[in-house]
Image (cartoon, rainbow, N blue to C red):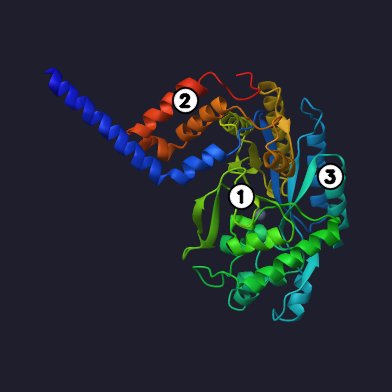
Amino acid sequence: MSAATLMTGFALLLMWLLASGTLLAAYHRRLLLAWWHEPVLRRPVLIFESDDWGPGDDVHARALHNLADVLAAYRDSDGRHPVATLGIVLALADTARIRETEINAYFRRSLAEYTSVLAAMLTGVERGVFALQLHGLEHYWAPSLLALAKCDSQLKDWLTTPGLPRTEMLPPALQSRWIDAVSLPSRPLSDDEIEAAVSEEVAAFRAIFHVTPTVVVPPTFVWTPAVERAWARHGIRYLVTPGRRYGARDGHGRPVAEGALVNGGHGEAGMMYLVRDDYFEPARGHTAARGLQALQMKTRLGRPALLEMHRFNFIDEPAVAEHASDEIRALLDAALAAYPAVAFLSSEALGRCLEKRDPLWVEQDHHRRLGMWAARVRAHHGLWRWSRLTGLGLAVWVLWIFCARGQDGAGGKS
Ligand SMILES: [Zn+2]
């Protein structure tokens, strides 16, 4: 092969790398920029996020006390207990009164009536192991349920059978609060309906807990920009997301994803996003090893590990609840052994650290931040698969070699 052919081949390769890398980077510029702006945590952070707690009987109260006891037995190196944030549902259908009206009107019973559950929540907050987050006035849009119950016997039973109905038993599309799912695809609620409902739920939270909620977790992660604006207007600052917004339900009832969200990112209304996309549900077979793996992955990328852990792990079979407690203990033992610097924060405390870009918590050094950015690109399977064939992959690889290799998970032993 002649030198001229070699030179031509080299020039063509260079042109390909430059052109393909530029095109791919331009196409994914929002995500690439978001990962650059996303704060890099200097310490591993572990948070349990437990949703759906609300009106319930003494079994629920005991479950909360047991969970608090499990968490209170541990501390991080700063003396903080692990925190389970409680995603609070403030009310539930009053089945007796709805039955009296032959499902022509909706009535609710407030969490305030369930004093043993409420006391268990507040005791956990005092002990430093629970943090209260708004999940919703209800885990559904009540007018949708009422309308559908007219022609759906299961829904009618759900709304009228004596006792406390379980929202987990509703069809998934109806567990979403911020859409009208009477027919599918879902339809958006009007701005007036949203404003009235958000105003009502924030007032109910204040009436029960005497504080304004600062963190909200949208039920089933379905919400719209209009809901976000209303939450922001009512003083809520942090929004727990799965790394994307689901704005609607499609014709099959599946959530419809819209765009990517990152930790510390802000929406138009000014709320800060936190990302919770790891699951730790022992009742579904998730083990301590899986929880530790999630913490390792997040720590390697300078991100917090928010583990989703619903109430259903704790309120059904005693053996299932005991198993869940054992897995939490095993995870905390393993996390403290692998990461002596692991920090146990609430999601609100995490949000405050990110908001202030507190140098104690958030990496300021550009060299390390570049390395972490490269690691984040490499960790995104879809993007990295294509990047490797282009100049973008080469650039990321070089950055990773020079800035990230050898930096292993802040505060980790491994
Ligand atoms: Zn929920």
The quadrant the C terminus occupies is top right
Residue neighbourhood size for the residue with mark 1, other residues' Cα within 10 Å, grouped as few (<14), some (14–19), many (≥20): some
Q: Looking at the rendered structure, which numbered label has been put on residue 70?
A: none
**Secondary structure state at the residue bearing disc 1:** loop
- Of tags 1 and 3, which is closer to the observer? 1
For disc 3, the marked residue is 125
Q: Which amino acid is tagged 1?
A: His
Identity, as a three-letter code, of the amino acid under mark 2 = Trp
Tell whether label 2 touches label 3 (CB within 8 Å). no
Query: Residue 24 occupies which quadrant of the picture?
Result: top left
Residue 218 percent across, percent down from the top left: 64, 56
Residue tagged 2: 400
What residue is rendered at 63% in x and 63% in y? 227
Q: Is residue 240 above or below residue 106?
A: above
- Residue 357 position (above or below residue 42): below
- Residue name at image x 38 percent, y 34 percent: 392
State the quadrant of the N terminus: top left
Q: Position of residue 233 (x, y in %)?
A: 71, 61
- Label of residue 266 in the image: 1
Q: Amino acid at mark 3?
A: Val
Quadrant hosting residue 350: top right
Q: Is residue 414 above or below residue 384?
A: above
